[in-house]
Image (tube, grey):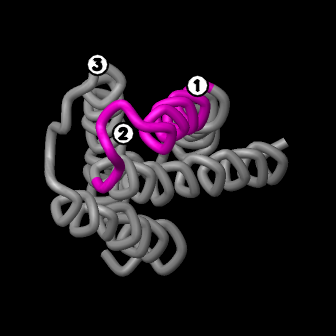
Amino acid sequence: MYEWFKALHLIAVIFWMAGLLYLPRLFVYHSASKPGGELEAKMIEAAEKLMRIIMNPAMMVSFILGLILLFGYNAPNLTSSFWLPIKLVFVFALMGYHVFLSKQRKLFADGQRPKSEKFFRRINEIPAIFTIIIVIMAIVKPF
């Protein structure tokens, strides 16, 4: 079953990452849109659906399957490997980033413009960088 859990975990992570990379792009468009306009309404709807239908379920499935893989199959490695704590720090940081994006989405839905278009363009790189670190820790296990 380990390989099936790992495959499903990876699939869920891919969906979650797609959302983490796409949602800030929606915020860029939303920031540039006319307040009260048609584009703003579409961005609010798109962001809400992305969070509700893809991002939240994918994050939860990723987390649950990650726990199964961690405690069900890798228990001996929990204290003997340094790569794992590094990976987990970045995984939890991505979860915090997810929560941050969720709060930004709610602010946009309330008619606010919480941050600038430039801000959302810059933070859009965070999940890509964190994913590189997480994948290297999980696959290469350099420490």
Q: Quadrant of the N terminus?
A: top right
Given this view, does label 2 or label 3 mark the residue nearer the observer? 3
Indicate left or right for 86 with 30 as reference: left
Q: Nearer the viewer, residue 112 or 74?
A: 112
Q: Secondary structure at mark 2?
A: helix
Mark 3 = which residue?
A: 110
From mark 1 to mark 3, how far is it between C-alphas? Answer: 17 Å
Q: Quadrant of the C terminus?
A: bottom left
Number of residues whose C-alpha sits closer than 10 Å to that of mark 2, classed few (under 14), some (14–19) or many (20 or more)? many
The amino acid type found where label 1 is placed reads Arg
Q: Which mark is residue 98?
A: 2
Mark yes or no: residue 25 visible: yes
Instruction: Say whether residue 112 is left or right of residue 76.
Output: left
Look at label 3 and name its amino acid. Asp
**What crowding class fits label 1: few (fewer than 14 Cα within 10 Å), some (14-19), or many (20 or more)?**
few
Label 3 Cα crowd, 10 Å radius (few <14 / some 14-19 / many 20+): few
Q: Is residue 70 left or right of residue 12?
A: left
Q: Position of residue 5 (x, y in %)?
A: 75, 43
Q: Of 101 and 14, which appears nearest the observer? A: 101
CB atoms at circles 2 and 1 under 8 Å apart? no
Residue 1 located within the stretch drawn in magenta: no
Choose the circle earlier in sequence order: 1 or 3. Answer: 1
Q: Is residue 101 left or right of residue 75?
A: left
Mark pair 2, 1: CA separation: 12 Å
Q: Main secondary structure of the magenta part?
A: helix
Residue at screen point 27% across, 25% down: 111
Above or below 134: residue 139: below
Identified by mark 2, the residue type is: His
Counting residues from the N terminus, which is met first, the one under dot 2 or under dot 1?
A: 1
Q: Earlier in the sequence, mark 2 or mark 3?
A: 2
Q: Where does the magenta region start and end?
A: 32-52
State the residue position of label 1: 52
